[in-house]
Amino acid sequence: MKIFVQRDKYSGLQPFGSISMNYINKFKENDIFEVSIKKARNPAFHKKGMALFNIGFQNCKWDPPSFDFYRRYITIKAGFYESAKVKEEWIFQAKSLAFDKMDDLEFEQVYKAVLQEIIYDIEADEETIEKELMNFF
């Protein structure tokens, strides 16, 4: 099981979010666990990335079947995909942008490339999109 913890000023590492809290509350006092620590991605940056996709989806000039389709399409256009040749055709699949699948540095590369694709797709400029992103926070 993976849980997220956050270091606070006074009591050290604390569960981050209700799922982590509920899991930790199942532990018995004095139980011992092996723990591996990896710094998680910035949740605010992840939200900003999803907000960016939302802006693109809401303003695109074509009719995507769904938000999820649009997100995968733009991710592939931005160059973050896996591909395989099946028979005589190439199949492309967007890489996962899940919170726990990449660190901040990799997500920043994805964010910048996606931003450029959305600028092109909705025919906007970066300043306009950044202003619009402020409405999501």
Image (spheres, grey):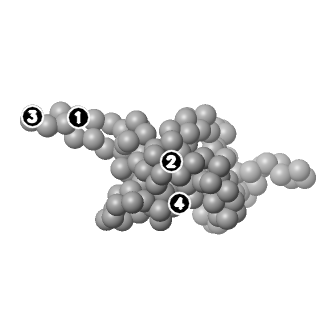
Name the residue type under label 3.
Answer: Glu
Instruction: Name the residue that disc number 3 marks.
Output: 88
Graded by Cα atoms within 10 Å as few (under 14), some (14 to 19) or many (20 or more), the crowding at tag 4 reads some
Residue 105 lies left or right of residue 13; in this view the side is left
Looking at the rendered image, the disc whose residue lies closer to the viewer, 1 or 3, is 3
Marks 1/3: CA–CA distance: 10 Å
Q: Which mark is residue 119?
A: 2
Give coordinates of residue 71: x percent, y percent: 42, 54
Instruction: Name the residue that disc number 1 marks.
Output: 84
Write the residue at 67% across / 65% down: 135
Marks 1/4: CA–CA distance: 30 Å
> Please, what secondary structure does the residue beneath circle 2 have?
helix
In contact (CB < 8 Å): disc 2 and disc 4: no
Sooner in the amino-acid sequence: mark 2 or mark 1: 1
Name the foreground residue: 89 vs 124. 124
Name the residue type under label 4.
Answer: Ile
> Please, what secondary structure does the residue beneath circle 4 have?
helix
Sooner in the amino-acid sequence: mark 1 or mark 4: 4
Name the residue type under label 2.
Answer: Ile
Looking at the rendered image, the disc whose residue lies closer to the viewer, 3 or 4, is 4
Name the foreground residue: 19 vs 83. 83
Q: Which mark is residue 70?
A: none
Marks 2/3: CA–CA distance: 33 Å
